Amino acid sequence: MSAAADLDALTDFFDHYGAALTAGDLSAIASCYAMPGMVVSDTYSFSFSSPAAVALSFLGAAPAYQERELVAAHAQLRDVRPLTQNVTQVAVDWEFLDSRGGFLLGDSIRYLIRMGEQGPQICVVVRSS
């Protein structure tokens, strides 16, 4: 796959992931993750080994998105660094749109993505803000 195709695939992937996040579609969110996977931040880390565990970890986030009336999410890909033939580190700044048309800045997150036969999947999430 070419670098341009990889970038297109990553853009499409994060569009799908953002739509799943704002819709609270736990099944679609879980399908974006490779197993096992891990989330790391300054104050906590956890791993998961099943789609059900991923869905459970997002169970609390879905109401938070709805409470803030977020209707769309856009991933601004800041830095895309291929690490191996199939593994890429992607730095993303999330931008959200609320139901009143307001623009909200979200988190800056680094993702370790594996490109597989099914397309990109998240292996590791590092919350950087």
Image: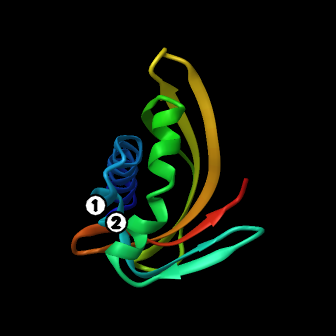
Residue 1 visible to an observer of this rendering:
no
Residue 115: give x, y in percent of width and height.
35, 72
Quadrant of the image occupied by residue 94: top right
User: How many numbered dots are placed on residues in this image?
Assistant: 2
The numbered dot on residue 10 is none
Instruction: Name the residue beneath numbered marker 1.
Output: 27
Q: Provide residue 71's location: percent of width, then percent of height.
A: 41, 30
**Residue bearing the label numbered 2:** 30
The residue positioned farthest toward the right in the image shown: 42
Q: Mark 2 near mark 1, Cβ–Cβ under 8 Å?
A: yes
In percent of width and height, residue 15 lies at: 36, 44
Q: Label 2's element?
A: helix
Q: Residues within 10 Å of mark 1 (few under 14, many from 20)?
A: few
Please report the residue visible at 32 percent of the width from the left and 48 percent of the height from the top: 16
Residue 92 visible in the snapshot: yes
Residue closest to the eye, 67 or 116: 67
Most foreground residue, 65 or 91: 65
Q: Quadrant of the N terminus?
A: bottom left
Name which residue lies at 44% across and 20% down: 99
The outermost residue toward the left is 117
Number of other residues with Cα within 10 Å of mark 2, as a class: few under 14, some 14 to 19, many 20 or more: many
Left or right: 38 with respect to 29? right
Q: Quadrant of residue 93?
A: top right
Q: Amino acid at mark 1?
A: Ser
Task: Measure the alpha-carbon separation of dots 2 and 1.
Answer: 5 Å
SS at mark 1 in the image: helix
Q: Nearer the viewer, residue 118 or 47?
A: 47
What's the residue at 34%, 65% (across, down)? 30
Answer left or right for 107 relative to 55: right
Left or right: 56, with 16 as reference point:
right
Going by the numbered disc 2, the residue's amino acid type is: Ala
